[in-house]
Image: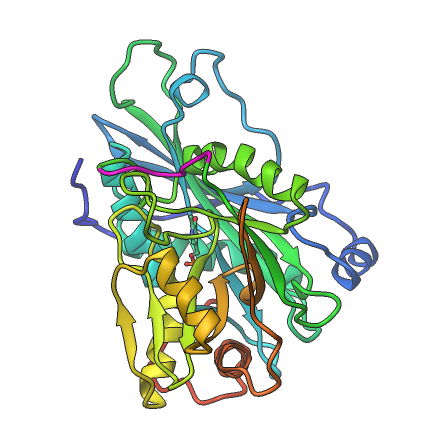
Amino acid sequence: MKNLLAPQTLQFTRTANENAATEADRDAILANPGFGKHFTDHMVDICWSKMGGWHRPRVQPYGPISLDPAASVLHYGQEIFEGLKAYRHADGSIWSFRPEANAARLQRSAVRLALPELPTEYFLDALKELIAADGAWVPSAPDTSLYLRPFMFAKEAFLGVRAAEKVNFYIIASPASAYFKGGLAPVSIWLSTNYSRAGKGGTGAAKTGGNYAASLVAQEEAYENGCDQVLFLDSVEETWLEELGGMNIVLVKKDGTLLTPASDSILEGITRDSILQLAADRGHTVERRPISLQEWKDGAASGDIVEAFACGTAAVVAPIGTLKGADFEIVHEAREDSVALSLREQLTGIQYGKVDDTHGWMMRLDA
Ligand SMILES: *Cc1c(COP(=O)(O)O)cnc(C)c1O
């Protein structure tokens, strides 16, 4: 399914939405967008077929996708997605954060799900095309953004089990509020022991809907136990920390060392990678290695582990206040001088154009 040599840049056709939101409607939405509820006027749609490769790129009015009831995604879940944001800077310009990393991850996910790899150049062009149509939907209030959701799925109408020969790639966009309304209150996490989200050789490292489907019942269990989120352990030894199912996890030691799980079955977050890079720049030691639940319990009890946080594009960084299991609880007191919040400040500062982008992570989308 290699098709990475883009013969030429794609020529998008653009169809304007004749029922686009009025400026007043849009302003009302942007004043309080929430998360994932409202969508912009347009979407990107690119087709792929085994014979023809990537073709017919378009920007078209946002709206329902028509699917044959036999479309294989509906039966066998051959689907992948990405998540990134567009940020408005003080001068009005619109930027995204490390979009090439999202493009590369979409390619890795595609390989695992037997879907075609979208060339990086096409991915970046598609983002720019959507912003050219819907740039007015990027909000400007502090900590708001336009969440971009690229996704790809098997559209072929065929009930036989094999990789689909017809696939579509889309990007939709949804304005997003500041994720945490009441400041950065620590979140509570439930340790799942009844369920795993991924296994050895499975799809845990791919950003695919099925991983989320597998995590929902555990998330329900977290709610029943009064927790906000769920943490998964490895499925083989049920010993090693993996991730939250939608966010990665990092622990902070008293001496400033940052610990994060290394595993083939977790999704490698771009937020985590960036946070750890900023921490290393500051002189923190960063260890990416297997971390047992016992190490966290012992470290919290002895005072050697002083902070824990979750990270991902949507929430950026969320301090973890408690980890609850069936028969134990770990508590981390909120710290004013927390490493998590200080790194969050620097990262969002880069994203909003207020802090030096020393790694060249930002890419302009509206020029
Ligand atoms: C997207 C995702 C993350 C976070 O990745 P970011 O690139 O930081 O947004 C973590 N875990 C899972 C399972 C994910 O799907």
Q: Residue at x 21, y 26 (%)?
A: 51
Q: Position of residue 65 (x, y in %)?
A: 54, 28
Report the front residue among 350 and 195.
Answer: 195
Q: Quadrant of residue 275?
A: bottom left
Report the front residue among 119 and 225.
Answer: 225
> Horizontally, is 175 left or right of 28 in the view?
left
Colour scheme of the rendered structure: rainbow
Q: Quadrant of residue 58?
A: top left
> Horizontally, is 75 left or right of 132 in the view?
left
The prevailing secondary structure element of the residues shown in magenta is: loop
Is residue 81 shown above or below 142? above
Is residue 121 shown above or below 113? below
Is residue 174 shown above or below 94? above
Q: Is residue 195 magenta?
A: yes
Report the front residue among 66 and 105.
Answer: 105
Residue 290 appears in the figure: yes
Range of the magenta residues? 194-200
Q: Position of residue 243 (x, y in %)?
A: 41, 52
Task: Name the quarter where the N terminus is drawn.
Answer: top left
Q: Position of residue 264 (x, y in %)?
A: 24, 49
Q: Residue at x 38, y 13 (%)?
A: 157
Is residue 348 shown above or below 226? below
Q: Residue at x 49, y 88 (%)?
A: 355
